[in-house]
Structures are given as C-alpha cells and as structure tokens.
C-alpha cells in the first residue's frame, strides 16, 4: 500500500459495509477520502485494493480476524462436548473390515518411532503388502490405543484405536468454528459446525474409520489454515497448511487434488506478484516442500530401499486406483444427494446461491475455494476409470465445504429476516430463527434412528435404507461389517451350547471380539452337513451384494433367528440350522450348468455360462479354489441369469472355478468341470 500506518481492527469491516450498502461511486469516494488519513500513495486506488483484499485476494492490507476470547471458549466447549458424546457411544461401534490390517501396520509404525529400530518394520504375516496401508491414520490409532488402552486402561483395544478418529473430528469442528467466527460471523460458524456434526455418515464414520476420517480432517485443516494465512497475511499459517497437506498425503492419495481446490486463492500471485509481501511468497513456495517432508517422515517404509518401494507404490496406485468403468460416472453425485439430510441440502443450496450471486461473507475468491472444495472430490471420483466404492466414503472430504455452505445459507436467512425493511418480517424474525435452528437440528433424528449404523443412512429422496435396498443400490447395507459386534453379542447370549458359527464375510474380524468358549468358528462351505454331527450351526452375515452358498440356502429354506434393521432395511441376519430343521439338500440331482468363460481384467472377474433350463432356481453356486476339485470358497448368484461380474478380493494366483445350480426343491446339480483362471496384475 505504500504506507507504514496500521489500519484499525474494524476499519476494513466498516469500509466494506459502507461500500456494499449501495452507495456506488460516491461511497467509494468517501472510503477513499477516509483512507487517505492512513497515507496510501494512490487514494483513488484504495477502494479497489480494499475490495480485492476483502474478496479473498492478498493485495493491500490484511483482513483482520475478529475472534474474541469467548470464541476460543466456545471452540473448547464444542470439542469437549463432541468428544464426550462420542466416547459415551463408542462401545456400540464395531471394527470395520480393513481396520485389523490398519492396526497391524499402525502398531509397527508406532513401535518404530518409539524405538527407532528397523526390526519394528517387519510386516511378515500381513494380509496385504505394506504399501497398501497409508500410515498416518493407523499410526495415530495405535498411539491412542497404547495410551488409553494399554497404559491407562480406560477403554478396550477396539475403542482405544477408535479414539484417534473422534479426537481428530473434534479438532476439525473447533477449527471450523474458530475460522468462521473470525472471518464470517458466529452465526455462520455455529450453524456450519451443527451441519457438519449432524451429517449421519460423517458421525458414524468418525467412530471407526481410521483411514478416511483422518484424511478428511487433515485435508480440511490444510485448506482452512491456508485461507486464514492468506486472509490475514500471516506466513506461519501458510506453513502450517503445508504440514497439514503432508499429513493428508499420508492418509490418502486424494490429497494430491488440494492445489486444484486452493487455486482460486493463489491465482492473484500470477498477475500481481509484486503486491505480495516476500514472506508470503516464501511461505507459499515452502509449503509443498514441507508437505513432502511430512509425508516422508510419516512413512518410514520408504526410508529403506526408497527407489524400489517408490516403484512398488506407483504400481499399486495404477492397480488399485482404477477399475472397469470407461465413461464418466454419476454415482458420486447421486450418492451425495441421497445420503445427505434434505434440510442440509436445502440450506447448502441457499448458501451457494447467496454467496455466488449476492455476495460471500469471506469474499469472491474464498467462495470459489469453497465451491472447488465441494466439487473437486466429486468430479475426481467421477472420472472415467476411477474405482469408486463404499458410497461416499472415498470422496467424503467434500463434507466440510457442504456444511459451511449450509451455515452460510442459514445465516443469510436469519440476516434477511432481521434486516428486512418490511416491518412485519422483522416482527416475525424470531420465528424464522427458530425454524432455521430446527432445520439444522432435524438430522439428529436420523442419527438417532440409525444409531450405531449411521454410515448406512439414506434420505427420503430414495426412501431411506429400505428404499435403497429395494432398488438394489450397490452397498446399501453395513458394508464395513461393524454390525458383527452386535450380532456376536446376540450369539453369545442365545446360541445353543457347543454350536458351530459360520461368518462368510470377514471371518477374521470375529477374533477381535469375545466369543463364548463353547462356540466353534468354522469356514465350512456346506452348512447343511454340520447338523448331522448333532450340533446346531449359526450363519451370521451382513446383507452384502456377494452371496455364498450358505446364504442362498438359508434365505431360501429358513427363517432368520435375529436381524438388525434400520429404516426399513436389513443390515445383518443370523440363521440357525439344526437337526430339527428337517432340511436336506440332494446333491448331484441335476445335470451341471455349462461354464463358458472366466476372465480377469483390472481386478474384476467376469463369468458367463449357458442359460439353464431349470425353472425354480434359487441361485447359481460358484466354487473356487487353488487346486482342481478342492474349493476354498463359494459365491451364489441369485436368480436366473447367465453372467456375473465381481470385484476380486482374493490374493493373486491361479484359481479353478466350478459351478452348480441350487433349486427351490432342495436339489443341487452336479458341478461343472473346473475352469482355470489366472488372477495377476
């Protein structure tokens, strides 16, 4: 600005409000005249510099943050309240299917940092290569487990690992509040936090997602710290953004998209770099370097044999980041629309419209950053060839931006009614304020109804979880398998003595829960053979898209002993088969189906067979194993179809596949001759 004078703390807000009140050129002239008392070399240029700064640029004086001590107290209350509510309910949330492997690597990374010995990085016995587990989330989970479970004995091992995610979410909530309270107002800050914390799937995942929640937090903190640093012209916050970016890179590859999100804020550097302080430019240049350094420090796996392991890492990204879709995918946007509470969607839409067409409380460039923050994750997961699954879990970093827009929308409605020139509207402003608050609190009902399976939430647009399942939406169930915790509690209480238990999906999770000593966990392929030994057998499974022989068998001929239901949908079933069930399957009663082809491409296995002429089919049974005639697993394709495509979840190698047909009369056909398939990269 060419001045050594310091603008008073509220001067920018005063000038901005005067200019935006509709005074036009006359108001700008008055602002310029007033600004001359602070000594700018070109008073006529002052309003433009002021406007550019207020709209998120960095030309001119910094925008002062209007944060008070009370805001820090409120942020601490938000953190404490959130943490308390989550800890109180933590015992109801189970392990997700990938968590044991994350813990395996996280415990070893933590041991490495504590002892600094390469022996700690011995990953023998892992279910998958070390390169497939990003280090930051699992290491933090290992840290909270060691502190609160092993050392202080306050919680068990499962809940100890889960404390990391809820603590990080508490940090994010308080950070969102402080940022918005200082830059956009306390109403916007409070409503935005309320919108974020009541997103059902975010609330649910915060309890037991040690990968995506840490990524969401560090991704968001990187954006918030960069915005704060640019708005206030404080280099240390820009450097802090680099630290958060590095930690986000250490949780998921999605963090590579952060420059696309922050580009609108940094664009002025390209056209007016001389107007920026040197310290800001140095901080921005150092930020990516700091991010890479943080990633390297967080991932000691790369400290040894770095070149070979980088090549391994690159091959892993190509193999697991892409699937079979060849065109643009609309599932990401659709999943956002049907898994977000309708009230939050409505307020967010109002916030986007008002901030884009009327004016953003943080300025035009910050508005563009928020829009990019919302859209980039969705567009990235919609690209051709990108493998997207788990509903919104793979791109959930959009959630804070959506919540901030919702907060802006709610605050703008309140401000409109309060400041309206219509007297009758001002009189009823308090009614609108209450209505807005009720709208923001309404998703709490959904959180309560789905508890503790909020990660399966669907809104009324699709008819809730029941509607999603009736439409056969992919993974419209407890795909994380966390409901096993409740299912096992039921088995421990109600199962007959010395019974067998079969868990077709994720049986490794059962070892992390207490199982009654007389119950025997088995992986028997044909559960109808077990009651002949005089023992009952229980089948517990989550209603995933992939069925096994036993699942088709029980659903066709038995009634469930226990079910977990939410909002018209079924998450988990438990069936019992005993000698009293009078169920017998006649095998080799029909000719075998003709298996035509079995192919593998980019982790997807596709099978096709000759259509069968049997009329009362329960399903086609697919057996697979690594030795001809010896099968390790099964799948059941229900109904009359002649093709099946599935994302393979087995180790690489050569497999032999055979098929049979199961009918409603309790007859299973002969198995088709084995077909060999090679499953490699």
Image (tube, rainbow, N blue to C red):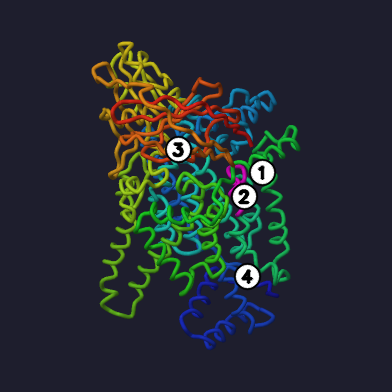
Q: Are marks 1 and 2 in contact (CB under 8 Å)?
A: yes
Tag 3 residue: 610
Magenta-span inclusion, residue 203: no
Helix, strand or loop for disc 2: helix
Question: Looking at the picture, how far across and down is residue 343, in whole percent?
Answer: 34, 59
Query: Of marks 1 and 2, which one's residue comes earlier in the chain?
Result: 2
Q: Nearer the viewer, mark 4 or mark 2?
A: 2
Image quadrant holding the C terminus, namely top right
User: What is the x, y in percent for residue 679?
Assistant: 59, 33
Distance of label 3 from label 1 (alpha carbons)? 55 Å
Query: Could you tell me if the residues under marks 2 and 3 are in contact, i.e. CB atoms within 8 Å?
Result: no
> In this view of the protein, can residue 88 be seen by the observer?
no
Structural crowding at the residue carrying mark 1, measured as other residues with C-alpha within 10 Å and reported as few (<14), some (14–19) or many (≥20): many
Q: Which residue is mark 1?
A: 294
**Residue corresponding to mark 4:** 61
Give the farthest residue toward the bottom.
26
Inter-mark Cα distance, 3 to 4 = 74 Å
Q: Please name the residue that numbered disc 2 is placed on.
A: 245
Residue 92, x across and y down, in percent = 36, 34
Q: Is residue 327 above or below residue 271?
A: above
Q: Earlier in the sequence, mark 3 or mark 4?
A: 4
Q: Quadrant of residue 282?
A: bottom right
Q: Nearer the viewer, mark 3 or mark 1?
A: 3
Q: Is residue 78 left or right of residue 362?
A: left
Label 2 to label 3: alpha-carbon separation: 53 Å
- Could you tell which of marks 2 and 3 lies nearer the N-terminus? 2
Bounds of the magenta segment: 248-257
């Amino acid at each position: 600005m060419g001045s050594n004078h310091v603008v008073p703390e509220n001067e920018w807000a005063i000038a901005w409000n005067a200019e935006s009140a509709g005074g036009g050129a006359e108001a700008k002239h008055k602002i310029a005249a007033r600004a001359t008392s602070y000594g700018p070399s070109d008073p006529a240029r002052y309003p433009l510099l002021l406007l550019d700064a207020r709209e998120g640029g960095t030309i001119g004086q910094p925008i002062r943050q209007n944060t008070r001590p009370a805001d820090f107290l409120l942020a601490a209350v938000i953190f404490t309240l959130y943490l308390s509510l989550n800890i109180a309910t933590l015992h109801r949330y189970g392990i997700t299917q990938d968590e044991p492997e994350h813990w395996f690597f996280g415990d070893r990374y933590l041991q490495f940092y504590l002892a600094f010995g390469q022996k700690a990085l011995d990953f023998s016995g892992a279910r998958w290569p070390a390169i497939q587990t990003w280090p930051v989330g699992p290491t933090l989970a290992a840290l909270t487990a060691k502190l609160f479970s092993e050392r202080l004995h306050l919680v068990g091992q499962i809940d100890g690992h889960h404390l990391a995610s809820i603590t990080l979410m508490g940090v994010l909530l308080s950070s969102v509040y402080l940022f918005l309270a200082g830059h956009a107002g306390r109403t916007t800050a409070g409503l935005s936090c309320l919108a974020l914390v009541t997103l059902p799937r975010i609330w649910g995942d915060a309890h037991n997602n040690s990968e995506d929640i840490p990524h969401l937090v560090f991704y968001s903190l990187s954006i918030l710290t960069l915005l704060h640093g640019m708005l206030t012209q404080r280099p240390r916050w820009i450097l802090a953004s680099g630290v958060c970016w590095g930690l986000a890179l250490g949780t998921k590859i999605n963090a590579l998209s952060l420059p696309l999100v922050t580009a609108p804020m940094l664009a002025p550097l390209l056209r007016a770099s001389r107007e920026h302080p040197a310290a800001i430019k140095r901080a921005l240049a150092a930020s990516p370097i700091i991010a890479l350094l943080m990633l390297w420090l967080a991932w000691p796996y790369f400290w040894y044999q770095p070149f070979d392991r980088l090549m391994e890492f690159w091959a892993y990204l190509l193999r697991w980041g892409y699937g079979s879709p060849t065109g643009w995918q609309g599932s990401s946007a659709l999943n956002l629309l049907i898994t977000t509470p309708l009230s939050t969607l409505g307020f967010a839409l109002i916030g986007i419209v008002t901030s884009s067409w009327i004016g953003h409380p943080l300025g035009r460039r910050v508005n563009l950053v928020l829009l990019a923050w919302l859209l980039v994750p969705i567009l990235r997961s919609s690209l051709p060839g990108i493998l997207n699954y788990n509903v919104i879990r793979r791109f959930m970093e959009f959630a804070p931006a959506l919540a901030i827009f919702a907060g802006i929308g709610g605050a703008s409605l309140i401000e409109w009614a309060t400041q309206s020139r219509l007297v009758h509207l001002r009189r009823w402003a308090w009614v609108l304020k209450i209505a807005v608050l009720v709208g923001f609190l309404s998703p709490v009902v959904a959180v309560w109804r789905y508890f503790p399976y909020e990660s399966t939430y669907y809104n009324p647009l699709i008819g809730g979880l029941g509607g999603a399942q009736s439409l056969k939406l992919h993974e419209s169930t407890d795909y994380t398998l966390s409901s096993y915790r409740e299912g096992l509690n039921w088995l421990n209480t109600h199962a007959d003595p010395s019974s067998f238990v079969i868990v077709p999906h994720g049986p490794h999770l059962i070892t992390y829960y207490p199982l009654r000593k007389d119950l025997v966990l088995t992986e028997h392929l044909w559960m109808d053979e077990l009651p002949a030994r005089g023992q009952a057998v229980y089948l517990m499974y989550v209603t995933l898209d992939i069925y096994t022989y036993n699942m088709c068998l029980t659903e066709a001929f038995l009634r469930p002993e226990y079910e977990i239901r939410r909002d018209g949908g079924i998450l988990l079933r438990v069936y019992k088969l005993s000698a009293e069930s009078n169920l017998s399957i006649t095998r080799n009663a029909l000719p075998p189906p003709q298996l035509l082809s079995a192919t593998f491409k980019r982790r997807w296995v596709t099978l096709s067979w000759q259509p069968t002429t049997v009329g009362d089919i329960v399903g086609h049974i697919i057996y697979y194993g690594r030795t001809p005639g010896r099968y390790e697993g099964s799948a059941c394709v229900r109904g009359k179809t002649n093709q099946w495509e599935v994302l393979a979840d087995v180790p690489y190698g050569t497999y032999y596949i055979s098929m049979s047909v199961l009918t409603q009369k309790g007859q299973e056909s002969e198995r088709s001759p084995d077909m060999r398939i090679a499953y490699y990269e």
